Amino acid sequence: MAALIEFRDVHKAFDRPVLDGVSLQVQEGETVSILGPSGTGKSVLLKTSIGLIPLDGGDVLVEGDSVHGSSKVLKSIRSKVGYVFQYAALFDSLTVYENVALGIQDDRARDLGAAEVRKRIETALEGVNLDPTAVLQKLPAELSGGMRKRVGLARATVGRPRIVLYDEPVTGLDPVNAAAVSLLIRKVRDAYGVTSLLVTHDVEQALEISDRVALLDHGKLRFVGTPQEFRGSDDQLVRAFGNREAASTLAAAQQQED
């Protein structure tokens, strides 16, 4: 079966090599998490999947189409994808309604009409446990960090994409809100049948919600497998990384309780 997303021998360098021959397939309906220490290229890999960062070598295919194709092909690829940015990336001068509406392409919004667009925005907000009547006209500055994350998730899913990309979705959140976002990611996957590619430093989150996880190390994939295989791996780096991140998560939770 052809992969929905396929990274083929991807290379990218800035002042040093960041991605050094990454190959990975993501099947339709799958949730795959990319793990790795900060600065190891996780977010760079995610951005290459929709052509936000050009490659130095290799290719990325989405439903068989290369992100290096024509602008028309790239636009078609991006129309299938919702993107949840690391810090929500909401526009400060726009209301919640206006921010979420950006997730529906202009031509699609015209076809749907104003009433249907509003209905979809309200449904998307309800889907991430936000009350539309309470937040639609608020500005991002009036929301908590957890609420901004959820608005970002609503924007990424309101257009009913086939693929959702998550860039560090729980960064900066306390353990309670981080757990809530993890539940929402599963809820979105189950409700819309989307394929999810997740970049995270949170090992426990990844193991809980993913079909497979991949560990990126010095620009290469050190490990790809199921959560069970990750937990049972004999690779010392995999074990050390998992234990270190689990300890870090526990420490953060204890600090929050204090």
Image (spheres, grey):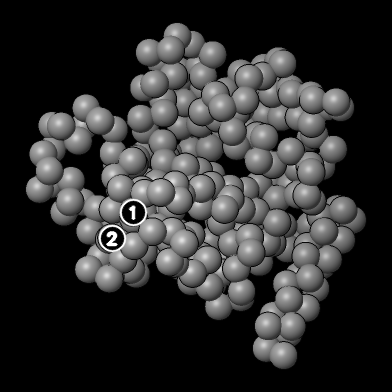
Placement of 50 over or under 152, stated as above or below: above
Circle 1 packing at 10 Å, graded few (<14), some (14-19), many (20+), is some
Residue flagged by tag 2: what amino acid is it? Gln
Asked if the residue under mark 1 is in contact with the one under mark 2, i.e. CB atoms within 8 Å, the reply is: yes
Mark 1 sits on what residue?
95
- Left or right? Give the position of 102 relative to 33: left
Label number found at residue 137: 2
**Hey, which quadrant is residue 75 in on the image?**
top left
Q: Nearer the viewer, residue 191 or 161?
A: 161
> Distance from label 2 to label 1 (Cα)?
5 Å
The structure residue drawn at horizontal position 13% and vertical position 32%, both measured from the top left corner, is 111
Q: Position of residue 130 (x, y in %)?
A: 33, 68
The structure residue drawn at horizontal position 43% and vertical position 59%, both measured from the top left corner, is 140
The structure residue drawn at horizontal position 57% and vertical position 53%, both measured from the top left corner, is 87
Q: Position of residue 40 (x, y in %)?
A: 79, 42
Q: Determine the secondary structure under disc 1.
A: loop
Q: Is residue 16 visible?
A: yes
Q: Residue furthest front?
A: 93
Disc nearer the start of the sequence (2/1): 1
Q: Position of residue 170 (x, y in %)?
A: 59, 62
Residue flagged by tag 1: what amino acid is it? Thr
Q: Nearer the viewer, residue 162 or 1?
A: 162
